[in-house]
Each structure stands twice: as C-alpha cells, then as structure tokens.
Image (cartoon, helix red, strand yellow):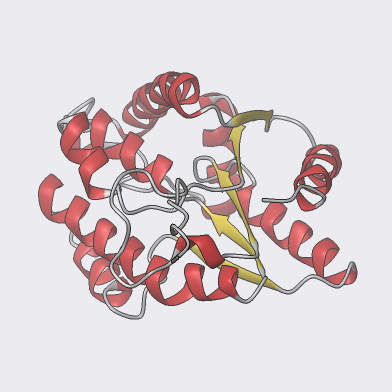
Amino acid sequence: MKATPKISTRHFGTQLAGCDFTELKGKLIVLEGADGSGRSTQIEMLKDWLENLGYGTVNVGLKRSTLVAEELDAAMQGNILSHTTRSLFYATDFADQLENSIIPALRAGFVVLADRYIYTLMARDIVRGANPAWVKSLYSIALKPDAVFYLRVSPQTLVERNFRKNATLNYWESGMDIGLSRDMFESFMKFQRLILAEFRRMQAEYGFTIINGNRRARAIHAELRAKVQEILTQTK
C-alpha cells in the first residue's frame, strides 16, 4: 500500500510547480523594514554570527534576480513606471529568486537570510492603492518563513538616517509617485507613516515579530541573535 504524501502548509496558497516544500531542511529568516531601518547591517551581522557557528548562509533580497533585476532597476531610474508594471516586475523578481535561490538553498540545509520579503512588496502595493486580494494572489506562491522580524523605526529617525547616508531621499521610498505632496520631505514622512500603519495591520494577520529599530545596532543584534538561536533549535 502506497503511503499518502504529506501535504505542505509552507506556502501561502499556490505551490510553485516542481518545488517540493516537504523536503526543505534549512531555515528562512526574514528581516523587514524601510530604507534606513538597519536591515542590511543586521543581515551582515547575523550572517557572520551564523557562519562562525558553522551554518551555511545565503542572502536574498529585492531586485536580486538574474532574470529581471537589472531591467527593473533601469526602469525605476526614470520614475515613470506604472503601479501595475512595477508590481509585476517585483513579483517576477521574487518568483525567480524563490525558485532558483531560496528553495535550493533550503533544500541543501542552508539558513536563508532575506533582506526584505513579500511583506514590504505587499505593503507598498496596498498603500499605492492596489487591490489587497490581487496583491496576495501575486505572492501566493511564497514560502512561509520560519521567522519574520520587522525593524520598526520612526519616520523622523528614518529621514535622518537617509540624509546622513545619501544626503537625499529616494523618489520611490518617499511615495512621490502617488501625489502625497510636492515636497519630497513631507511626502516621505506621509508615505512612511502609511507603510507603518499597513505593517501594523499585517502583523495582526501574519504574526511576525516587531523589533524596536530606533536603538543601536548592537542592541538590536543581541535581540535578533537570541530569537534566531531559538529558531535554529526547533525541528520542523
């Protein structure tokens, strides 16, 4: 008598064709947060710590697909992408990384560190007026992470950090495409408040962990490291 195959509950709705989620041995750890929240710094610190412990790691993030990343980046430089085209670009970028980077790494037992995942993409689209059901359908193939940490930082701190780092604000991160204000600083503040509100709503739905990102990097890292250590000792 043939054994009944296990049904995977690791995706949000639609399993990617040819991908067996029941064989994944690694862990998927996601860090979410706006530009200036310290995500990339925390990813690097976690990577160094994990590799010192003997874990293999793989980093993924937004606009890193070999399929469309360069085209998406080039299209965004002109500040003329329609909301739908932009959404589909990002969804394609994510699907390519899921199939060709994330799942193979997890199958091999690696810890995958995601410098943002579908939650940022969904929040951005919804704030820009996209139908939430349509947005969810774009990412229904996504693998459910083992943990999601959202680095919540106040808009005022974000704008200060962005000015220190780049001396300017990003057009898209400021929401200039949706007409919140002609002034980029004011638009940035309004847009980031909308994103914060959407993440609060999403946290209630998806249950990810909110981390106070207004603190020093070492304090944040200590908290993240303790939480990731707990995840690494869990069995699927």
| Residue 204 shows in the view | yes
Residue 92, above or below 158:
below
Say which residue appears at 49% left-offset and 24% top-offset: 203
Q: Quadrant of the N terminus?
A: bottom left
**Residue nearest the viewer, comparing 65 with 105:** 105
Judge from the rendering whether residue 44 lies leftward or rightward of residue 105; answer left or right.
Answer: right
| Residue 82 shows in the view | no
Residue 10, above or below 223:
below
State the count of labels: 0
Q: Position of residue 40 (x, y in %)?
A: 62, 56
Find the residue positioned furthest to the right: 53
Q: Position of residue 84 (x, y in %)?
A: 11, 48
Say which residue appears at 33% left-offset and 71% top-offset: 96
Judge from the rendering whether residue 108 lies leftward or rightward of residue 125; answer left or right.
Answer: right
Say which residue appears at 12% left-offset and 55% top-offset: 85
Quarter of the figure with residue 108: bottom right
Q: Position of residue 137 (x, y in %)?
A: 21, 43
Find the residue positioned furthest to the bottom: 66
Find the residue positioned furthest to the front: 1
Say which residue appears at 25% left-offset and 67% top-offset: 72
Residue 220, above or below 53:
above
Quarter of the figure with residue 136: top left
Judge from the rendering whether residue 122 lies leftward or rightward of residue 57; answer left or right.
Answer: left
Quarter of the figure with residue 56: bottom right
Judge from the rendering whether residue 22 lies leftward or rightward of residue 64; answer left or right.
Answer: right
